[in-house]
Image (cartoon, helix red, strand yellow):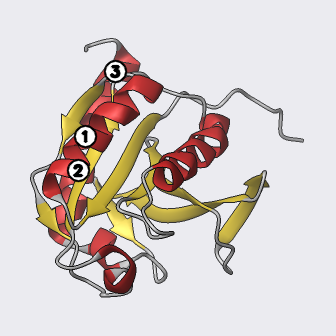
Amino acid sequence: MSQPSRADDVKLISSLFSADKAFIDEIIHELERRFGSVDWISPELFFDRTQYYAKEMGWPLHRRFVSFKELIRPQDAVEIKLETNRIEAEYSEDGKRKINIDPGYISLERLILVTGKNYTHRVYLSKGIFADLTLVFNRRSFRPLEWTFKDYATPEIISLFNDVRERYKRQLRGVI
């Protein structure tokens, strides 16, 4: 029989994209007010794998990934997703979002995104929020799965998340 054990704290991350580059920086500061200091911000990226959001948010879309210094409990991801939904709604204009915020976390084994959308590979957590197993860590790198969003599966993005995982690993060891 397996014995329940406490999960390690995990590294909170988020993807942010908007047609307004400066607005992304404003929202990063808003996230810091709510979730604590950001300890890493990706280079500016284009969100160009799909035009799904173009009608609502405009085009082109700019993207940044961030990670937060303070580690969280994995179950906190539910409340964090609900809070990021509130931020998106708060800054919406005429019922259209100006920003998309997709939080998740990195553990040693995986990258999880949290979402309000159900799908075959997503596991229900609570309060209408699901966990999306997006990347798994295997053979010294994150690896995509057959359902991984194409933008998360690129070597460039995987390399960024490998670096964030290394930062997280040092935090667990008390090195940072």
Indicate left or right for 158 with 82 as reference.
Answer: left
- Residue 163 shows up from this direction: no
Per the image, the residue denoted by label 1 is 26
Split into 4 quadrants, where in the image is the C terminus?
top left
Indicate left or right for 174 with 154 as reference.
Answer: right
Q: Secondary structure at mark 1?
A: helix
Total number of numbered labels?
Answer: 3
Kindly report which numbered mark, 1 or 3, lies closer to the viewer in this rendering: 1
State the separation of the CA atoms marked 2 and 1: 5 Å
Per the image, the residue denoted by label 3 is 171
| Quarter occupied by residue 151 | bottom left
Residue 83 at x, y = what percent?
A: 57, 42
Residue 116 at x, y = what percent?
A: 64, 64
**Image point (54%, 63%), residue name:** 133
Q: Are marks 2 and 1 in contact (CB under 8 Å)?
A: yes
| Quarter occupied by residue 101 | bottom left
Q: Which mark is residue 23?
A: 2
Split into 4 quadrants, where in the image is the N terminus?
top right
Indicate left or right for 126 with 78 as reference.
Answer: right
Q: Earlier in the sequence, mark 3 or mark 2?
A: 2
Q: Amino acid at mark 1?
A: Glu
